[in-house]
Image (cartoon, rainbow, N blue to C red):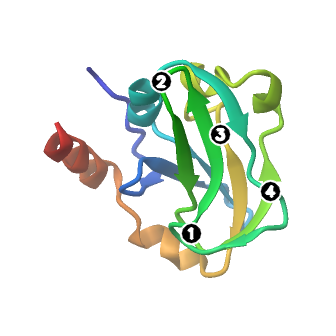
Amino acid sequence: MSTSIPEELRYNKSHEWVRDDGDGLFTVGITDHAQKALGDLVYVEAAEVGNVVSADDACCVVESVKAASDVYSPLDGEIVEANEALEDSPELVNNDPYGDGWLFRIKPTTPADFDALLDADAYAGLLSEEE
């Protein structure tokens, strides 16, 4: 199963991706690998705007016909936006996990923590270890 791993993103071991939006905010979603493993999503419980989270805190839930899965914040910070389109269209995560299927935006406490996350090559290595 071929998985898309965009080079410009960073990743964590629980299969979330992070994009530096260049405005002090970072967008987070689940990876192509994660959405394929879950199958067709039927519900997304949005992250709560205003919540202050630590890295690895569960901050929202995605549910498929197979399972419900927590989504973890890859960074310490404050949730500043949730993708409201997913309330009516959770399948956006399956159709476009790195685009319209993003889950939330976060204002990190320490933006440099982004650089400590896995790059595309390291994430690809993690996936090959899991297989």
Q: Amino acid at mark 2?
A: Lys
Q: Measured from the top left, where is residue 102 in percent x and y?
A: 65, 39
Contact (Cβ within 8 Å) of mark 4 with mark 3: no
Residue that numbered label 2 is attached to: 66
* Amino acid type, residue under disc 1 in the picture: Leu
Residue 125 in picture, x, y percent from top left: 19, 48
Q: Residue 45: which disc?
A: none
Report the residue marked by disc 4. Answer: 48
Q: Nearer the viewer, mark 4 or mark 2?
A: 2
Q: Which tag, 3 or 1, sits closer to the chain's start?
A: 1
Residue 100 lies in quadrant:
top right
Element at label 4: loop
Q: Seen in the image, is 60 located left or right of residue 65? A: right
Q: Residue furthest bottom?
A: 110
User: What SS does tag 3 mark?
Assistant: loop
| SS category of the residue bearing label 2 | loop
Quadrant of the frame with the C terminus: top left
Identify residue for label 1.
75
Instruction: Please tell me which residue is depicted at 67% across the width and 43% down the height of the picture.
Output: 103
Q: Nearer the viewer, mark 2 or mark 3?
A: 2
Report the residue at 64% width, 20% height from top: 91
**Which one is earlier in the sequence, the residue at label 4 or at label 2?**
4
What type is the residue that disc 3 sits on? Answer: Trp
